[in-house]
Amino acid sequence: MDGRSTPQPADQSSEAAPRTATTSATDELPGYLPPGADPENRLFAPFLKHMVSDQVEFWTSPKGLKKPDALKTFVPFVGFASLLVASDSWLSKQVPDKPNQLSRSKSVSDYITFSLIGVAAGSYVLGHLTHNEHLRETGFLAGEAGLNSYLVAFAFKEATRRERPYQGNGHGDFFAGGASFPSEHSAAAWSVASVIAHEYPGTLTQIAAYGLASAVTLTRVTAKQHFPSDAFVGSVLGWYFGRQVYRAHHDPELGGAPWGSLLDGKAEGARDPANMASPYVPLESWVYPALNRLAALGYVETAYLGMRPWTRMACARMLDEARQRSDGDGAAASGQAQKIVDALSEEFSAETGRLNGDANLGAGLDSVYTRATGISGTPLLDGYHFAQTVVNDYGRPYGQGFNDITGFTTSAVVGPFAFDLRGEYQHAPGTASDPLPVLQAIASADLTSPVSDARPDIDRFHLIDSLAAFSWDNVQVSFGKQSLWPGPGESGPLLLSNNADSMLMIKLESVAPYRIPLLSYVLGPVRTEFFLGQLAGQEFEFNNPTLLGPGNISPQPYLQGPKISFKPTANLEFGMGFTAQFAGPGLPFTWHNFLRTFYAHTSGADTNNNNPGKRLSAFDFTYRVPWLRNWLTIYNDSLVVDEISPIGSSRPTINPGVYFPQIPKVPKLELRAEYLRTAQGHEFAPGFVYYGVRRYRSGYTNEGNLLASWIGRAGIGGQAWVTYSVSPRTRFQFSYRHQEVNKDFIEGGRLNDFSIHGEVKASPAVSFSGFVQYEEWKFPILSSVGQTNITSSLQLTFYPHGQWRKQN
């Protein structure tokens, strides 16, 4: 505690006053006694009366779920808890299981929980002895909240009887005789902590109380005593009863703080947009080229082009910056910049309202879409060894003939929580296996064994994205299937892209720039992100001296990576990051092995199972040329294998580019061109980029597709785009793509693509997009003569107008 016990005025918060006819509707949520309903905090009869009323309010609260405000609270909680339950087994397997670590975590959780209970009991006794009514009430209410949460948690345990992580098959089966759901330790800790933090609302007290409670939640999981959902639900129960008891029985004459609305992000002051979670804008959205163009024209200086996707709230902040700059520029206001600003203003009207004080409450069906694609001729399907006809498409399957996807996107935001889901039905024709000589050549290049690559017809429902996120102080934590784009180019970052299926990952990122003391004085504002995910579809791993596979190895390897980007000036951005592929059979996921991926690499003769992982390091920059800054932006993406950084390396993979956001005399025309190279000299054998000879023989892939640039493991080539914008939502684009593969890598080959893309916003609710692509290719091992194919695609997207959001 911070020692503050001076009484404060009773009128400092409406929540501290008895309920009147004018009390806010937000206080009508089920399960909450009216604020200040009964502050008679004494043992025996008053205490029993409190306990009965607390329990009655809790168990009768479902009858109040008919109220809209109650559903806004209940539905997101159930949704997030359900997502955790579905992910429990995977998350629990990420926890190291060394006996000393498990024992240490269990001891920490026990010690902290009993210490918090001791603080509550000691506060009551000491307050009684010293006649400090504030301290006595703190102990009394903390004990009452803790006992309430314990009783409810015990009742749920007996009803659900869920197995603990170390019991049964490790899946946490319910009604199987266990006692895992929910966590009583977490419930008790959060009950006591939340009461103490509000009775004594000093910064140090709150950090200590909530920090200790969070430590209990975490260590109950790392001790494998509970699954994440058990700890989460227990923590929420504890928080609930802390709020319930404090609101109903706290005497405002003694001091303390009001208990504001978590979901509105508001207590006594204005709502803080920094505490509002937000879904991410899909990587293929028109929003990125629109904001990118505004940045190149000088209207957005806070856009970090080397770190995508962006949240919708982040886009709204950049839009607000562009709006202010365009309002002060009469020439641009009548040109392309103003048109883009107007289109983005329509797209992000809800988020703009939240920046200006609206509640972060909303839900709806964002879009429904269907896309038909026909491919005549023989397409290329294997970008890891040869090339791909369709790239940067989330690893969606395709084949010769008719292909189809039909799907939807939906999202919801509730204060610091956000939920997003994109799912679709996918159809793709089956493909025959390559001939045995091709399979043998592939196996020889990968040091594996030949495996048929035949594929049956695909008809399935598949999730493209699915995440739950929590945001506080512009830091957002998200969990679910996600894709990343950590580079400034358009052909696809060298480190990661959406060329492969999204990964199941947990991601932590700063969604808005911030400053690091001293360092930012030189390097400017910074953005950071970190992710940890698990790959899928890996079929081979070299567990020295044994080659595992073919077949899905278990457990599948993990991929983790940090990224940091700086903006020293308005014109310059640069960033650094890496990814490390680690763990898998024979190399368990432990904290020791995880930390070694940051600093260690075993090479040379020592190629045994001690190798901590396959690491790729990247550096990128973007520069608006000052004397041509409204006309020219140059950038570069670079990567090295198993080196600290591409800077100073003699063998970097590179992807430089130039971008003209408008052409003189033709302001609606844009031009972009990029060069790519992964082919190396004689120091390494062709094909070593994105390949893991020492362990990960399936390479840098997810579900068989390259996780990064389509240029492949030994390629050289480029891509160019010419875009004409009738409006920001109606655009036509001609593009050319070229790829040459080193002839020493599976006999090499080449590819040329010519395509025309178009997108038309037919009405506020309907848009059409599509492309026609002509491709010619020759990979001698696949065909002794050149091949051609034509791909045509048309997508219809419907944007419903039934989204609900709160505007004040």
Image (tube, helix red, strand yellow):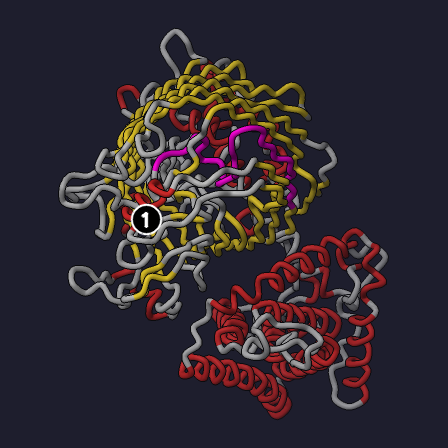
| Residue 243 colored in magenta in the image | no
Q: Which residue is mark 1?
A: 443
Q: Quadrant of residue 137?
A: bottom right
Residue visible at 56% across and 73% down in the picture: 170
Query: Do we see residue 250 in this rendering?
Result: no
Q: Is residue 797 above or below residue 439?
A: above
Residue visible at 51% across and 36% down in the picture: 315
Which residue sits furthest bottom?
A: 129
Q: Is residue 532 above or below residue 285?
A: below
- Bounds of the magenta segment: 386-411
Q: Is residue 220 above or below residue 495?
A: below
| Residue 391 colored in magenta in the image | yes
Is 626 displayed left or right of 432 in the figure?
A: left
Q: Is residue 227 above or below residue 730?
A: below
* Number of marks drawn: 1
Q: Quadrant of the C terminus?
A: top right
What secondary structure is found at the residue carrying circle 1?
helix
Is 276 displayed left or right of 61 in the figure?
A: left
Residue visible at 80% across and 57% down in the picture: 23
**Mark 1 residue type:** Ala
In this orientation, which residue lies closer to the viewer: 160 or 206? 160
Which residue sits furthest front?
A: 436
In this orientation, which residue lies closer to the viewer: 127 or 647? 647
